[in-house]
Image (cartoon, rainbow, N blue to C red):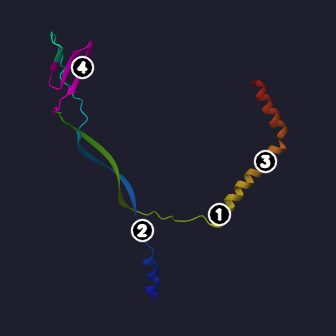
Amino acid sequence: MKRLLFLLPLLLIGCRTVYVPVESVHTVTQIVRDTIVQVELITFRDSVSIPDTLSRLENKYAVSYALWSGRRLNHSLSIKDVQIPIRIQYVDITRTDSVQVPYPVEKIVREKYVTDWQRFRLRLLNWLVLAVVLYFGWKYRKPIIAFIRRLIIKV
């Protein structure tokens, strides 16, 4: 029974595994269809000169009528329903992401902690050093002020 009581604390004490995230690189390649493509139309220039009062011009994309009547020139332009073939561009996009992948790490256990008495002594030492500096600063304030004035005047 005494052996079991001795082994019980050993069962409660042990190393604990902690997962720490680590970056790894993940690359994704994607093919995207780009529909914003500049299309250049074929340039048409045409002119006609006839003795009649009605004129008609036509090309692949539009029809134009001009009519002369009563000292006025009336002109109309109509656009045809024409399907313009557009080439589609495919663009490869490569995106690299950093993904955090956790892996197990053993937890570091401190061997000893600072006791309250040691912490008190460290704080007391800080206060004593401050008191000594203030004491000597007050005791030798006149030579210190004279020294500072000499430094200021030289500059």
Label 3 or label 2, whichever lies nearer to me, is 2
Question: Is 12 located above or below residue 43 in the figure?
Answer: below
Which residue does the numbered mark 3 point to in the structure image? 134
Query: Given this view, does label 2 or label 4 mark the residue nearer the observer?
Result: 4
Q: Residues within 10 Å of mark 2 (few under 14, many from 20)?
A: few
| Number of marks | 4
Towards the viewer: 90 or 24? 90
For mark 3, give the secondary structure: helix
Range shown magenta? 56-84
Q: Which residue is drawn at 24% across and 29% down?
A: 38
Task: Provide the residue designation for mark 2.
Answer: 16
Label 3 vs label 2: CA separation?
49 Å
Residue 65 drawn in magenta: yes
| In the image: residue 53, left or right of residue 106 | left
Give, as a three-letter code, the residue at label 2. Arg
The Cα atoms of the two marked residues, 2 and 4, are separated by 90 Å
- Give the percent coordinates (x, y) of residue 56: 16, 19
The span from disc 1 to disc 3 (Cα, nearest Å) is 25 Å
The amino acid type found where label 1 is placed reads Gln
Upstream in sequence: badge 1 or badge 4: 4
